[in-house]
Amino acid sequence: MEPKRSLKFKENVAAYLFLLPSLLGFAFFIVFPIIGSLLLSFTEWNFLTGFKGIKFAGLDNFTFLLSGKDEWFTKSMLNTILFALVTVPVGLTLGLLVGVMINKYVYASKLFRVVVFIPYISSVVASAVVWMVVFQPSYGPINSFLMSIGIDNPPKWFTDMKWAFPTVMAFHIWQTLGYNVIVFMAGLKGIPNELYEAATIDGANEAKKFRHITIPMISPMTFFLATMGIIGSFKVFDSIRILTKGGPGNETTNIAYYIYREAFSFYNMGTANAAAWLMFIIIFIITMIQVRQQNKWVIYD
Amino acid sequence: MSARIKISKLLNTLLLGLFTITMLFPLLWMLSASFKYEVDVFNFPIEWIPPRWNAWNNYKEVWSSNYDFPLYYLNSIKVSVFVTVTQLLIATMGAFAFAKLNFKFKQGLFALFLATMMIPDQVTIVPKFMLLTWLGLIDTHGGLVLILLFSVYGVFLLRQYMMSIPDSLIEAAKIDGAGYTRIFIQIVIPISKPAIATLAILRFIWTWDDYQNPLIFLNSKELFTLQLGMSQFASQSGTYYSLLMAAAVCAVVPLLLVFIAGQKFIVEGITSGAVKG
């Protein structure tokens, strides 16, 4: 009995020593910030006033944000939802289309796979800077082209009240397409060829095979990408900060940008953290709904 | 029949080729503009092959002491390499404990780790900012590195891989008198090399690409990483677009090289969440 117990003790000590750096990191940079931000969300605090300035505010931040009195917050919320509603379906459809084509219907598939992935792997900042120049309203190549084919007043893209948000969404779709393609292709590779062969013998055409074999077989990837895509649209920050800073006006703001602006431009730490928790609650609810729906339409073999 | 399939495959290849070229348009334009004289950059119709080459001078200028670009580059390398190496060490050790050792509160701790993975950065960013302020580490590379050192994702990725190491291998080593440190270094690390490589490549790319954290935690120009430097360069008035594009090319090239070298690992890493098993 004795030696066995001491062995167990030794294993416990070893395990905690191996875990120590992780536990420290977890405590200081994850647990502490989570608790801290939850507490701050119930306060009114301008960071510049120091700790003396912290005032307990109860649920004021939350009721203020949800009351619609903060125009930037309301716009941010609406934009975030619109962003997910547009970029996720478009990104998934394009990703599946390109993935299926690369997988089976084209030559030089290896080359395509690399090329399609390039925008995703290129740095967001560099890509965004290039897009800004390419879509430059008065002398950028896109508008030069549009004017050359007779469109006299082409959109001003990132500085255009009407076009700024669609252009930001286009950038996001462009930037993440490679990721969708790679994940879909991993799924397509896993579909056994016999399924298609059997369908061919039964006289199914390509469209039928796609509808009845490909779509159901890759549903786990579709589910994964949809969940990640929706969560991803809530977190979009880099491109908005570089391309538009939320403008013109507040046309292109979103929830992640709102939190940044509230915290680090205005130092309103209370509202910033309350908004962050609202963001998390929404992400949580969406994930839970999707996990529950998953069993209905996702087929795991 | 087979000729018809060949023709349709050829047509599809052309179609997809057209699509990918359109997709690459901004990046191709960037490359082309970086070779040109400033006055030729916006010539229309687009001259994909520059009529007059100025590539050497553009790149030389970007890398000269007139701009802080070399400094930003060095800062990015410093931060990315340091974060990657340290995080690998921390994550490998933690993953080993979770995958192969038995200890009190193991299941609970692991569940707690996983539970926090869904929480977005936006929730934790303000307290992290306060923490660094208290420690006097705002606007230092040390502070930025500290913030990025630990990630649950790293522990999780490696733990999943290490679970597949047979327990018998570890038991045998124990019987031979090996301690946990030796088992870790001589058995677990060598077997886990593919997963460690995946994490190393992904972490390097993500740190190199990171814009939000440097933006919040750094203020001084001489500490800027490449991404901050680029966005600052772009927002200056009177920017030379040929130089800006040359700088952008230099920012993208290391990522492309890492991608080409580690393609297999990257694809495995980012699809591991989607593919079961």
Image (tube, coloured by chain):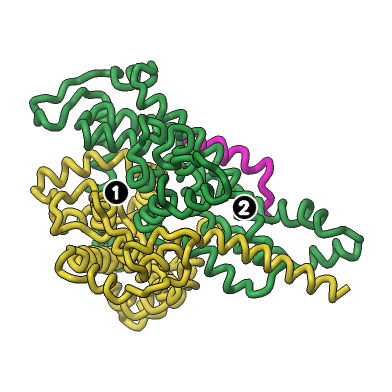
Chain colours: A green, B yellow
Residue at which label 2 appears: A94
The tally of labels here is 2
Q: Residue at x 68, y 67 (%)?
A: B14
As for residue B209 lying within the magenta part, the answer is: no
Q: Residue at x 28, y 53 (%)?
A: B234
**What kind of residue is marked 1?**
Gln
Vertical arrangement, residue B261 with respect to residue A212, above or below: below
Mark 2 Cα shell of 10 Å, populated few (<14), some (14-19), many (≥20): some
Q: Residue at x 27, y 65 (%)?
A: B80
Marks 2, 1: nearer the viewer:
2
Q: Secondary structure at mark 2?
A: helix
A53, A176: nearer the viewer: A176
Residue at which label 1 appears: B212
* Marks 2,1: beta carbons within 8 A: no
**Cα distance between the residues tagged 2 and 1:** 28 Å
**What kind of residue is marked 2?**
Leu
Q: Where's residue A133, x and y in %?
A: 39, 53
B188, B245: nearer the viewer: B245
Q: What is the chain identity of the residue bearing mark 2?
A: A
Q: Quadrant of the N terminus of chain A?
A: bottom left
Q: Secondary structure at mark 1?
A: helix
Left or right, B238 with respect to B193, comes to left
| Region of the chain picked out in magenta, as a range | A284-301
Q: Where's residue A199, x and y in %?
A: 85, 61
As for residue A295 lying within the magenta part, the answer is: yes
